[in-house]
Image (cartoon, helix red, strand yellow):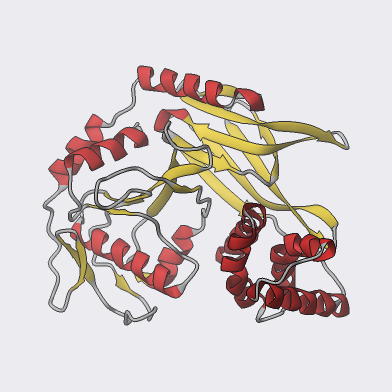
Amino acid sequence: MINKRLLIKHLLAHNDENSFYDKKRKITLSYKEGKAKFLKHICALSNSNPNNNSYIIIGVDDEDNHIVGVDFFDDSKIQNLINAYLEHPPVVNYENIPFPHLSNDKVVGLVTIRAINKITSLRRNIWKYQAHSVFFREGSMSMPNNKQLDLKDTNSSTVSAIENHAQNNIEHTLDGVFDFLKSRQDFAPQYKVFKEYFVLCWSGLEKKNKHQNYYSRVDIALINEQVRLFFSTLDEVTITYDDNTFSIIEYVNLGLQGANKYCQLEETLINFNNNASYTIKTKLLFIPPQYDKKILHHVYNSNNALLEQLKIDAPLNNHQEFDLKNLPVTYLICHLHGFDDAISKLEIAKPFLKKYSLEVYQLYKEATRILRKIKYS
């Protein structure tokens, strides 16, 4: 089993960007340009490595390889994006890898592109890239290919050696468990061994509500691979497990004008198998709360007026400050009820919310995260 933290270290230490490895300070999948560039790199790496894995490391400074980290990215639907836009799409995994020197809310993103030994191309237009375009890697660049592309195996031995050097061992596993228990000691850390092989650690603030235990500020990590499986500073989740499975049901707090309720968003089920393997499956459970259209029109117009206040940096009274905290989620609710411009308004609000306060900006990121999960499902 590969220790993903070690893998990242080996890739950074021994290789410049090349035909099987790329690094990025960050990626943005909220806009077509960001999606297009990401798909271009996936396409190019897949074509350049028909018989071995390729990797993209996210959260690294290009110039000096300094690991700066990015936000936890929990979009398990990223494969849906790949399948929608690429012909012969490779299997792509995005994993969140914690590093000791980063704050708890930061990780390094590791994208793994599995070899398929087929030519991958764009299935349809996106941004400035045309349908049927084919890309390949030339050094550190993802370039368009205007000629007949011949798939060549040039990296298998190199990638195999790197992956072999990143294999996990019992020392790394024990160190990972102790590090987790120490760093999460304020949030009741626990661990469980599955199938005498996998070690899963989790922590969170527990509270009971109507005979149900909920956890907030949840952190869940698979120690063998040094992969963070779940992290949230806002949501509440329920956790259940037996000898073979570990289940997480995520709830989101939605409502209008302070009348909120918890709605199920998604279930993540981790199955541990007898052959030293595991699978992670997600299932969307979300049913949006229903509201009268007249009430939503009033809320939508109030949000728009508040956004205009933000644009001119006008001072807000106490009531407006309360409404501002609800602005991201109310725009989300309006979008779910057919208000076509609600999400574009939310995107316009982003820099102003970020400037106003970290708390409000976190609420914005939570709303867009929910939207992303719903959209790709």
Number of disc labels? 0
At 55% from the left and 64% from the top, the residue drawn is 376
Residue 128: image location, x then y, percent: 34, 81
Q: Position of residue 116 (x, y in %)?
A: 27, 57
Q: Hey, which quadrant is residue 2 in on the image?
A: top left
Q: Give residue 33's quadrant in the image.
A: bottom left
Query: Can I make out residue 287 in this image?
Result: no
The answer to whether 102 is drawn above or below residue 92 in the figure is: above
Judge whether 186 appears above or below 62 on screen. Answer: above
The image quarter containing residue 134 is bottom left
Residue 178 or 111: which is nearer the viewer?
178
Q: Is residue 231 left or right of residue 61?
A: right
Residue at point 56%, 67% (across, down): 351
269 and 313: which is toward the camera: 313
Q: Residue at x 73, y 68 (%)?
A: 315
Name the quarter where the C terminus is drawn: bottom right
Q: From this viewpoint, is residue 36 visible? A: yes
Instruction: Answer with left or right where residue 119 lies relative to residue 201.
Output: left
Pinpoint residue 82: horizontal percent, then vertical percent.
Answer: 41, 64
Q: Give left or right: position of 145 versus 73.
A: left
Q: At which x and y percent is residue 93? A: 40, 50
**Which quarter of the image is occupied by the N terminus?**
top left
**Closer to the camera in the image, 235 or 158:** 235
Query: In the image, is residue 71 above or below residue 297?
Result: above
